[in-house]
Amino acid sequence: MVLNGPPPSMNTQTQCRTMASTEKQFDVSKLGGHGASRIDDVVAVELPLSIRITSGDVSKSMGITMRTPGRDRELALGFLYSEGLISEFSEVSEIKTSTDSIEIICRSIDHEILNDYNRISTITSSCGICGKDSISNMLHTHGPKLKNGPQISMNSIETSVNDLRKRQPLFNSTGGSHASAVATKNGDIVHLEEDVGRHNALDKLVGHLLSNKQLPADELMLIVSGRASFELVHKAIRAGFTVLIAVGAPSSLAVEMAREHGLTLVGFAKKESLTIYSSPSRVSIS
């Protein structure tokens, strides 16, 4: 939710108005070949969310993440699942939410993992896992060994990527959000999440799947709208995905982790062209 205050003074350089909880409209100056003009521009909302996990007498803050408001429940669940702090939705007994905070109350928790967990206090929308306080902690992935997964075709990948572009209302309005989606082996998208942070979009997606008892997601493809960073590969493996399709490029650490765990990592996915960086046997030309 965006807090509404008094309207800005008429001599304010840039005025704005709140539209929906995910979008905000600003009066801006635009310069171009035809000179300068004043227009209304819509941007994606970014606000802090404090996440806390509680079990019995033990309660720990997981820090503050910068996110697009909405689907906070799924975001927190997906985040905790990706970090290995919860493994099933049945472990959660209660969820308490407010405008800028959420508390996940669990019936039980792995106290060893919780005690080893340390992050800096604020996680920006551009970085989720970079708050870890040590390299060894960051590189540890909690989760089962990946299964064989589906066999998919280039046509299925092209279908899912094209559909992804059509199903991003926040991006279409603002140009400032990322998307994560799951699709069948035929390329049919079954669910999609958006957020200003690529890791938040994936956490929301994983939280949705967790809530609906659809993890591990070994028979579904994961598609992301941007580059494939290490953190996205980490989250994909934890959720049991065997195929990760990225519209953009992967990082070196993303490729190395995908190869280590047997994840099929596809980058630069576009019409009639893609690059497979690991486990290519799951992808066929026809």
Image: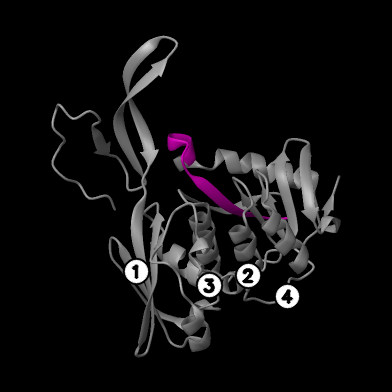
- Residues at marks 2 and 4, CA–CA distance in whole angstroms: 16 Å
- Residues at marks 1 and 3, CA–CA distance in whole angstroms: 15 Å
| Residue picked out by circle 4 | 145
Q: Of all residues shown, which one is farthest toward the top?
A: 34
Pointers 3 and 2 in contact (C-beta within 8 Å): no
- Residues at marks 1 and 4, CA–CA distance in whole angstroms: 31 Å
What is the secondary structure assignment of the residue under circle 1? Answer: strand
| Whether residue 242 is visible | no
Residue at screen point 62% across, 76% down: 142
| Residue picked out by circle 2 | 139
Residue at screen point 61% across, 74% down: 136
Q: What amino acid is at disc 3?
A: Tyr
Tell me which numbered mark, 3 or 4, is placed earlier along the sequence. 3
Tell me which numbered mark, 3 or 2, is placed earlier along the sequence. 3
Q: Residues within 10 Å of mark 4 (few under 14, many from 20)?
A: few
| Residue picked out by circle 3 | 81
The magenta stretch is 171-186
What is the secondary structure assignment of the residue under circle 4? Answer: loop
| Residue picked out by circle 1 | 102
- Left or right: residue 67 compared with residue 164: left
